[in-house]
Amino acid sequence: MSDPDPSFALLVERLLDGSIVPDERARLATLVRDDVVAREELRRQVADSLRLQTTLSAFDAEDTWLRVRMVLARNTGSQRIRSADAVQARLRAASDTANRRPSRRSGRVSARLPRRRGGPALAPLVASIAAAVCLLAAVWLVGAPTATPTAPQLARLVLVQGQVVVERDGRSLAGAADMALAAGDRVRVSSGRADVALARGDSVQLAAGADLALTGPGSVRLAAGSLVARVVPRAAGDAIAFQTPHATAEILGTTFTLDVAAARTRLDVASGKVRLRRATDAAAVVVGADEWAEAGPGRELVARRREPEPAAGPAVVSFSLVDGATNQPVPGYEQLRDGMVVERRRLPRYTTVFARTQPETVARVTFAVDGDRGIPDQRTPPYSFTRWDGKTYENLPLVAGEHTLEAWAHADTRAPAAPGSGLRITIRVVE
Amino acid sequence: MDHDPIDALVRRAQAGDQEAFHRLVVELQQELRLFVAARASAIDLVEEVMQAAFVTAYERLATYEPRGTFVPWLKGIARNRLSEELRSRRRFSSVSDDELESALIGAQLEHLEAEAETETRADELARMRGCIDKLGPRARLMLSRRYGDDLPLARLAQQFKQSEEAIASVLHRLRRSLRECIEAARGPAT
């Protein structure tokens, strides 16, 4: 195999990297125009690079499904496709309590729904009535005519936990999963969280206190609070803009956190690159992976390397045994301790284990049972050792004997677990 | 009884079970993404085509006869969609006078059209991973930093204490050697 021409290889790498400048671009264009072999090698290098990116990058299968589902709902208007609405899911889950069938095990990533509240002692009838009341209340709050925006749809709420309000045309609507969002809509999260799917597969996770306005295609404004965004890579000139009172973050494909306080906006980039442009004078800085920058009065606009802080990083802090049908802790096993004895006869039909993390929401949690790490990781709380099959959490088979449970909290979806981020306990299961 | 678990899911999806289609998407997305990536010109195109292929597959699900060929059928849809998208982008790049983009897309289109219609590559991901595993630790680390952690060329050069040009040459060679490894693993028929 002959060595590549170093200057050609460098131009190709800069093209792939997105750092190619116009002069270099013109040189590469001339090269491939005049040389068929170079042109074919460029095509192959681009394809090879995309294949490697696909193989080695972390892609969330559930994100793909959410995007597909969103388009199908828009294309077909099908109630069946839209039926993943959290309220309806709660209604289904409640009515299924009395008539549960064995869970199905397949697929690597689980479909996660908000944790259902309500005690395990609720009779199915009471649960059904309560859920029906919830549904009626939600329909009343959302209101059929106003829940569908008249302006073109730009985004969709895909997950709502806690109190989330969508302000539209001067009216406040209760946020709900699968709710379409249009330009001018404002999403306020009073408590809990809300996940918003933007066009082209971009997604935004809003934390409690966040106030996000959809200002137009490819542009949102975070007035307050904090968000974590994942933006799929795109070409230069096609950036999505996240505006705040202090700055604009122009994104070409990355994962980052944006946090707005009264005096400053802080940007933390996990992967990719973001250009942070200050609102007052349009000065800009490019913030790369593992870097952060702040914009605001008296703040120097520079990218700073994020130092690892193992002690302050996310960590798994406890485990609890949970009834997979009700999502409630199993009495007596609310907090599993190392060396604890667990009686099988006290376990419900569907038993799972939740890992509690500090902070409550982390980028990813990975698991192992008896050293087996082949358990799907989880990216949204509650972080469970088994997958949600749409009705229950699958049963974690705890046969009599000793079992070691391990879980690790990750600060970034792609980052390995940091020292001190994991928890390991051994329990003894007896009949 | 369906011996093909994919067809079993397809049958359920055809009967209106949305959860079954959800599982098909989750199960097949990585294989489809790799199929499209090997033929696309940009990562955003990969995501766009993959999403469109699943949507079209859902809309045409009734026309599929379960004979264990769902994956090739899905890839065929993706292939057609990719071809349409590449043509559309080539028109745009010629209007916007982007010579490099136009040349790259033109090359991808020629390749796509010359490729056998029945191309399926069911084990492409396994082959790719197998070939990566055969690389030395430093090469694997460099690929992981470049593609897993998305580190730019300049940062790679810092981390590996080499010039950008040297790193670019190494990456160029690594991709080429992986390509040759995958082609060898496919066997002479391809």
Image (cartoon, grey):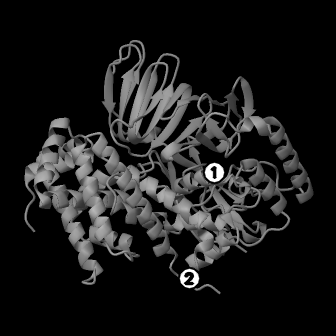
Residue at 19% over, 67% down: B177
Task: Give the residue number, with chain letter if any, for mark 1.
Answer: A382
Residue at 59% over, 71% down: A106
Amino acid on which the number 2 mark rests in the picture: Asp
Amino acid on which the number 1 mark rests in the picture: Pro
Q: In this view, does A1 lie above or below A326?
A: below
Task: Give the residue number, with chain letter if any, for mark 2.
Answer: B4
Q: Is residue A422 above or below residue A164?
A: below
Q: In this view, does B9 lie above or below A201?
A: below
Q: Can residue A410 be seen from the camera position used here?
A: yes
Which numbered tag is attached to residue B55?
none
Q: Which of marks 2 and 1 is in front?
A: 2
Q: In this view, does B59 lie above or below A272?
A: below
Q: Dot 2, crowdedness within 10 Å: few (<14), some or many (≥20)?
A: some
Number of labelled discs? 2
Q: Which of A378 and A253 is in front in this view?
A: A253
Is residue A73 toward the left or the right of residue B178 in the image? right
Q: Dot 1, crowdedness within 10 Å: few (<14), some or many (≥20)?
A: many
Is residue B39 toward the left or the right of residue B154 in the image? right
Q: Which of B66 and A209 is in front in this view?
A: B66
How far across and how far down the image is residue A17, in percent?
A: 26, 46
Residue A239 falls in which quadrant of the image?
top left
